[in-house]
Amino acid sequence: MEKVIECKNITHYYGEKLIYRNLNFEVEKGKVLGLLGKNGTGKTTIINILNGYLKPRSGECFLLGENMKQITPATKAKIGLLLEGHILHSYFTIEQIEKYYRAFFPRWKQEAFYELMHLLKVVPHQKINHMSCGQRSQVALGLLFAQDPELLILDDFSMGLDPGYRRLFVEYLKEFASRGDKTIFLTSHIIQDMEMLIDDCMILDYGKLLIHKSTKEILQGFHRFRFVIEKEILPPYHPSLWHTEFIVDHWETYSFESAEEVRNILESDGGTIHNLTEDVLSLEDAFIGLTGKYE
């Protein structure tokens, strides 16, 4: 498959604080990839690096086959970017901002922009800075779709949106992605929205890439297990078990292993496990199981 995004050995610091060391990942054409991580793990940082706004300490990034250090204007025009829901030139009217952006993108689709504006019930002479936060975000989305980009990069796309606007955003993104030749790389703190949309999931931990799997593989294969074990006995540490902890009157752990294998691991030190149950998880629950609640 063609690689639309490729990051090789990205290492970056803010001062002496390590953000990542030797971060490697790639995104194939036609995929919708969701980037998850707790605050401070570097989600926005990697988007800024991908777009050439930030120079990493070491490593290289490629978008649509070109190194970000020498990306051409023609390739840049194939990339749609939304940074944390912001839209520039908010002093423009709807009509003015459409005309302004149109000049930079050769594949511009004016009808895609005004279709969304019609749904928002805004008129061409309405000023953007007189709109609600949710409406301004939808204007930004309309500008992105009108560009008809091959690669769409969205940082915290649902920030400030109420449930209705978030659902509209997700539905438009799903339709955009369904064409098959579009690639989307996005972040959001609202993981329920991501679960409806993304093909693959990449989770950053502090200083590293924690996991990169298909969303289907995570939802079908990663489960929470609850169990009781004799007093005075602690569950063994094992790399296949994630974030084992005691909750009120029982233990919890998370794993990609089967219930039978989890039981074998837990009883490997001679303890006996009782009342072992297995829970199917949402993507948000899986994220918590993989990253921990408090770390």
Image: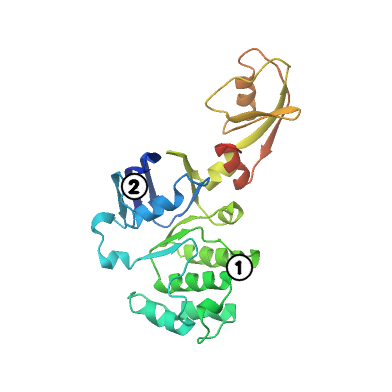
- Disc sitting over residue 105 in the figure: none
Residue depicted at x 57% and y 70%: 133
> Does 147 sit above or below residue 256?
below
* Residue 289: image location, x then y, percent: 60, 38
* Residue 263: image location, x then y, percent: 65, 23
Q: Amino acid at mark 2?
A: Cys
Q: Quadrant of the C terminus?
A: top right
Q: Name the element at disc 1.
A: helix
Q: Amino acid at mark 1?
A: Tyr
Please indicate, yes or no, whether residue 4 appears anywhere in the rendered image: no
Q: Residues within 10 Å of mark 2 (few under 14, many from 20)?
A: many
Quarter residue 145 falls in: bottom left
Please indicate, yes or no, whether residue 191 appears anywhere in the rendered image: yes
Q: Which residue is mark 1?
A: 165
Task: Report, in whole angstroms, how far the alpha carbon at label 2 lies from the one at label 1.
Answer: 32 Å
Q: Which residue is mark 2?
A: 7
Residue depicted at x 56% and y 37%: 290
Name the N-terminal-most of marks 2 and 1. 2
